[in-house]
Amino acid sequence: MKGTTHLAIGAAIGLAAAAYYPFTLKHAALYVTVAGFSALSADLDGTSMLSSKLGKLSKLIRELLLWGGALLLAGVAYIYYLEAQFYKEYTIISVIVFLLGMVTKQGMIRNALVSAIGCILLYVGLTYAMNWLMGLGLFIAWVPWLNHRGMTHTVWAVLIWGAIGWGLEQQLQLEGITIVSLAGYVSHLVADTLTPSGVKWLYPLYKKSIKLPL
């Protein structure tokens, strides 16, 4: 299912929470933001609305590695041709940079960038003793390397996300954040269950997809 659909469902959940709980503009914005983000987070294990903006940056980094390495090798060869001197260290660096550009896939670079963001959140959480942010950072750093619609699309991930939402609720002292987080995340799994591919809700205990395609 498209990311825009997941986001729309999450936003609807947030608006419903804003209508149910005592209303303020600040609280409404928080409910919609948390629900929308939660509804998209399960797809951090692949290309998603949350990571798609990193695609262009990933492509640029790969091209810089590839062409930068090639230029460095050309420079080393040119110096050797002119001065008959072989700079071992520069040559090794040039080869490493060029090979990284050759073998590193764009998706791998994107995953590394997402993980880097997770590590930053983890560091901030550690610095300010915010357990929920540490949990979010670990989640974001870990899930990009998982198979799509794998562990992030299970009840176990829902429990983890619920714990993160509960920590955020304690931080904000705003009733309903935990429920909104869970509802947003679960809405993603339910929506994907309605597609032909379905969702492995109980993976790895039960490895078959559960699906109710519309």
Image: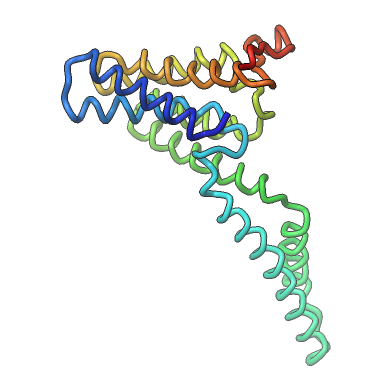
Query: Outermost residue toward the top?
Result: 205
Residue 82 position by quadrant: bottom right
Residue 35 position by quadrant: top left
In the image, residue 26 lies at what x, y percent?
20, 30
In which quadrant will I find the C terminus? top right
Foreground: 33 or 134? 33
Q: Residue at x 59, y 21 (%)?
A: 192
Residue 127 position by quadrant: top left
Figure check: 15 above or below 66 = above
In which quadrant will I find the N terminus? top right
In the image, residue 96 lies at what x, y percent?
75, 61
Q: Residue at x 64, y 16 (%)?
A: 213
Q: How is the image coloured?
A: rainbow
Figure check: 182 above or below 137 = above
For the image, the number of numbered tags is 0
Q: Residue at x 66, y 58 (%)?
A: 62
Residue 4 relative to residue 133: left or right: right
In the image, residue 30 lies at what x, y percent?
28, 28
Foreground: 138 or 80? 138
Q: Residue at x 55, y 18 (%)?
A: 189
Figure check: 104 above or below 18 = below
Query: Outermost residue toward the bottom?
Result: 82
Query: Outermost residue toward the front?
Result: 214
Foreground: 15 or 169? 15
Figure check: 12 above or below 95 = above
In the image, residue 157 lies at what x, y percent?
55, 17
